[in-house]
Structure formats: C-alpha cells, structure tokens
Image (spheres, rainbow, N blue to C red):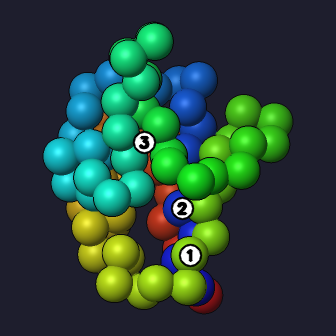
Amino acid sequence: MVIITLQRNKCIGCNYCVELAPKQFQMSKKDGKSVLLHAQEKKGFHTLKSPDQSIYEDNIKAKEACPVKIISVKLT
C-alpha cells in the first residue's frame, strides 16, 4: 500500500509534483495549487491510499522535488 499525503494549504504552486507524478497530481485552475487526485481530506491533509505500488517511485521524486516539503509518501 502506498500512502501519499499533501498539505494543500501550504502549496506554492510550483508544479513539480504534477510534472513528476501526473497520475496523482494536477494543478487547480481555481487557485493554482496542487490537487492530490482521489484523496480524502481531513484537517487540511489530503491523503490517498493506493494498493498500486508502481506509483511509489514517481511520488518519491515529487516529494523530494517539492520546495516547501508538503508531500509525504510511505510504503506499507
């Protein structure tokens, strides 16, 4: 299981996550911030739990590229 978490309110809209993991992230046309697709929101944290482990590498790259360090990726 891959667990990806995004603190969307701290997003600065740099677009790195979309470039590196386009299947999980896209930019909002409304406010220019990143959106974690198919995620559940709770207290400002957007979380996606996926059994597809093939998404892990791309999301690790997105996490490492994020200049404000608001993406977390775990493999369980």
Q: Is residue 14 left or right of residue 1?
A: left
Q: CA distance from mark 3 to mark 2?
A: 13 Å
Residue 45 location (% of width, % of height): 69, 42
Exactly how many numbered labels are in the figure? 3
Please state which amino acid type lies under the numbered disc 2.
Ile
Q: Which secondary structure, mark 1?
A: strand
Q: Quadrant of the N terminus?
A: bottom right
Please state which amino acid type lies under the numbered disc 1.
Ser
Residues under numbered marks 2 and 1 in contact, where contact means CB atoms less than 8 Å apart:
yes
Closer to the eye: label 2 or 1: 1
Question: Residue drawn 55% across and 31% down?
Answer: 8
In the picture shown, does residue 32 fall above or below 35?
above
Q: Provide the residue designation for mark 1.
A: 50
Question: Residue drawn 60% across and 61% down?
Answer: 48
Q: CA distance from mark 1 to mark 3?
A: 21 Å
- Does residue 1 show up? yes
Q: Provide the residue designation for mark 3.
A: 69
Q: How many residues crowd mark 3 within 10 Å: few (<14), some (14–19), many (20+)?
A: some
In the picture shown, does residue 65 fall above or below 50?
above
Q: Is residue 41 left or right of residue 34?
A: right
Answer with the quarter of the image where residue 43 lies: top right
In the picture shown, does residue 22 fall above or below 14?
below
Q: Earlier in the sequence, mark 2 or mark 1?
A: 2
Q: Provide the residue designation for mark 2.
A: 4
